[in-house]
Amino acid sequence: MELDSSFELELELSSLPQEKWWGNNCLFQLGGFWHWPQTIQGVNRVIKHFQPLPSDIILASFPKTGTTWLKALLYSIVNRSSRHRLTVDNPHTIIPTLEYDIYGTSHASAMPSSINHSRRILSTHIPYQILAKTLDSSECRVVYVTRNPKDTLVSTWHFINKSNKAKEEPWPFEVAVDNFCRGLIPYGPYYDNVMGYRKLSLDRPKYAHFLTYEELKNDPITHVNKLAEFLGCPFDAEAQVQEIVNGCSFQTLSNHQVNKSDGFPPRITMPSNSFFRKGVSGIIKNICLLRLSRELMHLPKRSFIPTGSSNGKSPMRRSEAAYDECLYIIVLCTKINCVNLVCNNF
């Protein structure tokens, strides 16, 4: 995987659409999606050079939708005899992200030795729409996890505001809401990112598995079993499943000293503890429901659910109205001055 030294010249940022995100921070558009300026070269390298092996497992996700949890679960499912490694290493150290850790520089070479185990598990936030040629021509297994957009937004807002850039100039929550609704967010638009992989899972169910953070949280045993079967390594006993679920729970992972640290894991630009917050679903609704009062209660009874979800109850459809209503709840929160309450309790 040695890259040509002239590769950097293949993607000129000045030739790409760009838009101010917040403060002095800009995002650049590639393939219809927005990217950080510091990661877009890596994204382009993945698109052009990555050739997955048939045995590879690709964890795809929109940022802050359960990536850390899924990294721990997938590693434990595939490497059951060595899952104790999660007690001493952050999941992001164990499972690298393609566009950051492997193709993040023009000097990328071999895969890190840390993933030279029985099967390579690799992560990415790159949307399917611009990675389709690579994935459609491969027999690798793709696991995609998504999350309620309200919780995704709040979690993203917290995460970004822990960065060094945000310490100099914080990202206001009201601006974050506007950015998210317009799709102006790294790897966004969110909805298009989700629906791309949903379509892949419907078109190629043998090679792509789609699940939601909420489904996994509500019934981890069932969905860990499904993941193991999808990856071709089913469990022999129910006790094995329970051990992995317990070992990868939010409470267990967040209590490991390595994940409490404010130090930076290898190849990671954020402190280890920034990947572990409360892991709670529906916080905005829980906190603000009473204060939203009639205005919220009179919203249509639809909410954003990734269509055709694994429970089989929702047909495949693109419901822009449902998506907008879900985000509108966040806007209402800002208008009734409960933003601080939301953000301090998530």
Image (spheres, rainbow, N blue to C red):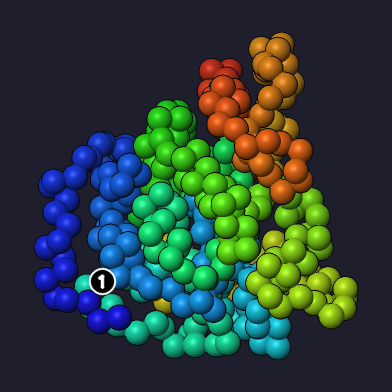
Horizontal side, residue 41 vs residue 312: left or right: left
Horizontal side, residue 235 vs residue 26: left or right: right
The answer to which image quadrant residue 221 occupies is bottom right
Could you tell me residue 246's position as x and y percent?
A: 78, 69
Determine whether 53 is above or below 302 in the image: below
Could you tell me residue 244's position as x and y percent?
A: 76, 73
Look at 44% across and 88% down and name the residue there: 113
Q: Residues within 10 Å of mark 1 (few under 14, many from 20)?
A: some
Residue placed most toward the observer, 228 or 41: 228
Look at 19% across and 45% down and name the residue there: 16
Determine whether 188 is above or below 263 in the image: above
Q: What kind of residue is marked 1?
A: Thr
The answer to which image quadrant residue 52 occupies is bottom left
Look at 76% across and 45% down and name the residue there: 311
Horizontal side, residue 140 vs residue 248: left or right: left
Q: Which residue is mark 1?
A: 105
Q: Would residue 104 be seen by someone viewing this image from the given angle?
A: no
- Screen quadrant of the N terminus: bottom left
